């Protein structure tokens, strides 16, 4: 008789940090390190309030200012210290950093359409492909999931990397990068196998 062992599952609370001025302007922030805007700080405070009753085993965040600020608000009043994880660094958009998404849509319509329809095939000039960014992030996520088996873990990761992570954990197709570029201070629950 064979015994089947159930896979260990963790609950991942995937949190997008509060918005920055680039998010509000519709600019590609990518791996640029920016603080939250006033609206973003309000979003992060609302997130912390919404999640106040959730008992986190650990809080990990991207090594950027907006994710660090959001994580710090999440752990206020808890006996937790957030930890920055380099693998959660947002996508390197190379020469696209700071560009208006609408500008790319108008000036390079074929490229814009290609990114929307087949995001895995595009790599920004001087940047990183979505596949490479997803692989880097998932390697880091598997490490933190092994540490927190059957626990609730908070991951504060900016978009578009957060949406790539969600797609990977939910075994879904890569999202339309143009639609998930901006952070908005929100969260989602994902059950993940360790």
Image: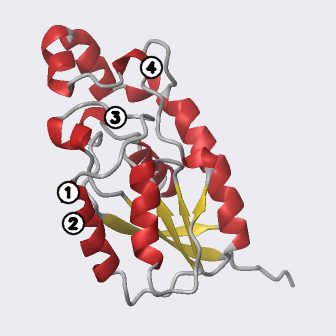
Secondary structure beneath label 3:
loop
Which of discs 4 and 1 lies nearer the camera? The answer is 1
Query: Dividing the image into 4 quarters, which one contains the N terminus?
Result: bottom right
Disc 3 target residue: 29
| First reached walking from the N terminus: tag 4 or tag 3 | 3
Disc 2 target residue: 42
Q: Quadrant of residue 175?
A: top left
Residue 172 drawn above or below residue 47? above
Q: How far, Cα to Cα, is label 3 from label 1?
A: 17 Å
Q: How far, Cα to Cα, is label 4 from label 2?
A: 30 Å
- Asked whether residue 166 appears in the rendered view, the answer is yes
Residue count near mark 1 (Cα–Cα under 10 Å), binned few <14, some 14–19, many ≥20: few
Labelled pair 4, 1 in contact (Cβ < 8 Å): no
Tell me residue 5's x, y (percent).
Answer: 76, 79
| First reached walking from the N terminus: tag 2 or tag 3 | 3
Labelled pair 4, 3 in contact (Cβ < 8 Å): no
Disc 4 target residue: 94
What residue is at 20 percent from the left and 25 percent from the top? 100
Tell me residue 68's x, y (percent).
Answer: 47, 58
| First reached walking from the N terminus: tag 4 or tag 2 | 2
What residue is at 30 percent from the left and 36 percent from the top? 176
Residue count near mark 3 (Cα–Cα under 10 Å), binned few <14, some 14–19, many ≥20: many
Labelled pair 4, 2 in contact (Cβ < 8 Å): no
- Label ID, residue 38: 1
């Amino acid at each position: 008789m064979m015994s089947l062992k159930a896979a260990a599952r963790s609950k991942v609370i995937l949190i997008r940090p509060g918005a920055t001025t680039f998010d509000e302007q519709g600019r590609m922030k990518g791996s640029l390190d920016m603080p939250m805007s006033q609206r973003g700080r309000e979003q992060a405070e609302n997130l912390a309030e919404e999640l106040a009753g959730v008992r986190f085993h650990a809080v990990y965040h991207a090594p950027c200012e907006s994710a660090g600020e959001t994580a710090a608000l999440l752990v206020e009043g808890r006996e937790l210290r957030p930890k920055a994880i380099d693998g959660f660094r947002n996508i390197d958009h190379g020469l696209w950093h700071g560009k208006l998404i609408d500008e790319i849509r108008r000036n390079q319509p074929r490229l814009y359409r290609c990114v929307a329809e087949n995001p895995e095939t595009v790599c920004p000039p001087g940047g990183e492909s979505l596949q490479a960014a997803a692989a880097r992030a998932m390697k880091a996520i598997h490490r933190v999931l092994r540490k927190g088996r059957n626990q609730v873990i908070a991951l504060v990761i900016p978009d578009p990397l957060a949406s790539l992570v969600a797609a990977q954990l939910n075994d879904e197709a890569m999202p339309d990068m143009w639609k998930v570029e901006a952070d908005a201070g929100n969260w989602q629950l994902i059950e993940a196998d360790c």
